[in-house]
Image (cartoon, rainbow, N blue to C red):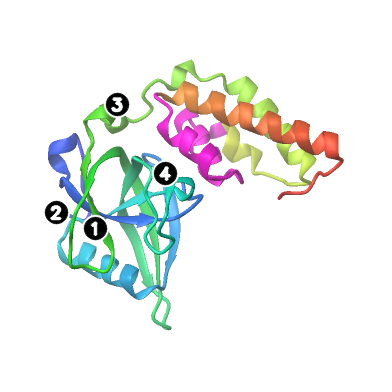
């Protein structure tokens, strides 16, 4: 697999992938996620991903509410596979890397493996539209998204690079804001599983409006 891989469909990806369960982590197609890898099992996962040439890691959230084993929690059924596109050694045994999202997947089954990290057989076919960049972005209500972003920034005394925001295509804007949002696993999972970009933007707007209303009612304007 070349370094600059081009994924055009499910046939370009392996059916079994390593998965990294991480609460609150949301990776979306063509989004970039920085990761600080330090646990031995995940260091081994990165080493193996580099060794096999695919450089792929599936990001998925643990489903804590339906888990009986804290050491090996149940997984949500939908995640997103990303490719390692940047990698650096920290000098103290850690890897600092960046994943670039490719496509969402549904977990078919978790495999019985000898590796310390978990692996799943996955299905990409429910998310074929993920392979098409900027699919459906014309349906996004960009004005409503920018209004709620402005309100959120004001409420939390935050600033943003408005020049970058205004020049960003709708897909990049929606996915970046969703990935960076400070909300919990249920909200992140809802945005991940949204059937299209328009719905993801609507979920993000609704969650943010509810969060702002709660903070206004309580008088709390700080991030939780």
Residue for badge 2: 1
Locate the N terminus and report the quarter of the image it occupies. Answer: bottom left
- Residue situated in front as seen by the camera: 193 or 1: 193
Say what secondary structure mark 2 lies in: loop
Name the residue located 27 percent from the left edge and 32 percent from the top edge.
131
Residue behind mark 3: 129
Task: Compute the Cα span from label 2 to label 4.
Answer: 21 Å
Mark 1–mark 4 Cα distance, whole angstroms, equals: 16 Å
| Residue 98, x across and y down, in percent | 39, 58
Question: How far apart are the alpha carbons under marks 2 and 3?
Answer: 23 Å
- Mark 2 vs mark 1, foreground winner is 1
> For residue 141, what is the image quadrant?
top right
Residue topped by disc 4: 31
Q: Which residue is drawn at 44% across and 26% down?
A: 197
What's the CA distance linking mark 2 and mark 1? 9 Å
Identify the residue at the far right of this view.
219
Principal secondary structure, stretch drawn in magenta: helix
Image location (x, y in percent) of residue 190: 48, 33
Asked whether, in this view, residue 187 is left or right of residue 16, the answer is: right
- Residue density around tag 4, few if under 14, some if 14–19, many if 20 or more, within 10 Å: some
Kindly check if marks 2 and 1 are in contact, taking CB atoms under 8 A apart as contact: yes
Q: Where residue 195 appears, x then y in whole percent?
A: 39, 24
* Residue extending farthest front: 68
Disc marking residue 18: none
> Range of the magenta residues?
167-195
Give the mark nearer the N terminus: 3 vs 4.
Answer: 4
**Secondary structure of residue under mark 4:** loop
Q: At x 73% / y 47%, what residue is drawn?
A: 158
According to the picture, the residue beneath numbered tag 1 turns out to be 55
């Amino acid at each position: 697999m070349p370094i600059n891989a081009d994924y055009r469909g499910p046939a370009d990806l392996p059916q079994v992938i390593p998965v990294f369960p991480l609460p609150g982590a949301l990776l979306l197609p063509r989004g970039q996620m920085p990761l600080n890898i330090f646990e031995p099992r995940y260091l081994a996962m990165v080493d193996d991903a580099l060794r096999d040439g695919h450089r792929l890691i599936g990001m998925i959230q643990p489903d804590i509410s339906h888990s009986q084993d804290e050491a090996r929690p149940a997984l949500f059924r939908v995640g997103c596979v990303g490719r390692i596109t940047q990698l650096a050694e920290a000098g103290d045994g850690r890897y600092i890397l960046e994943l670039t999202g490719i496509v969402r997947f549904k977990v078919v089954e978790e495999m019985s493996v000898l590796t310390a990290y978990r692996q799943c057989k996955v299905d990409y076919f429910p998310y074929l539209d993920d392979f098409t960049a900027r699919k459906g972005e014309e349906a996004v209500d960009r004005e409503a998204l920018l209004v709620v972003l402005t309100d959120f920034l004001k409420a939390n005394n935050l600033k943003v690079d408005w020049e970058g925001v205004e020049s960003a295509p709708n897909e990049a804007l929606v996915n970046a804001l969703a990935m960076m949002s400070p909300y919990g696993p249920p909200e992140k999972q809802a945005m991940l599983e949204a059937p299209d970009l328009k719905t993801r933007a609507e979920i993000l707007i609704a969650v943010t409006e509810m969060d702002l209303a709660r903070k206004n009612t309580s008088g709390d304007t700080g991030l939780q």
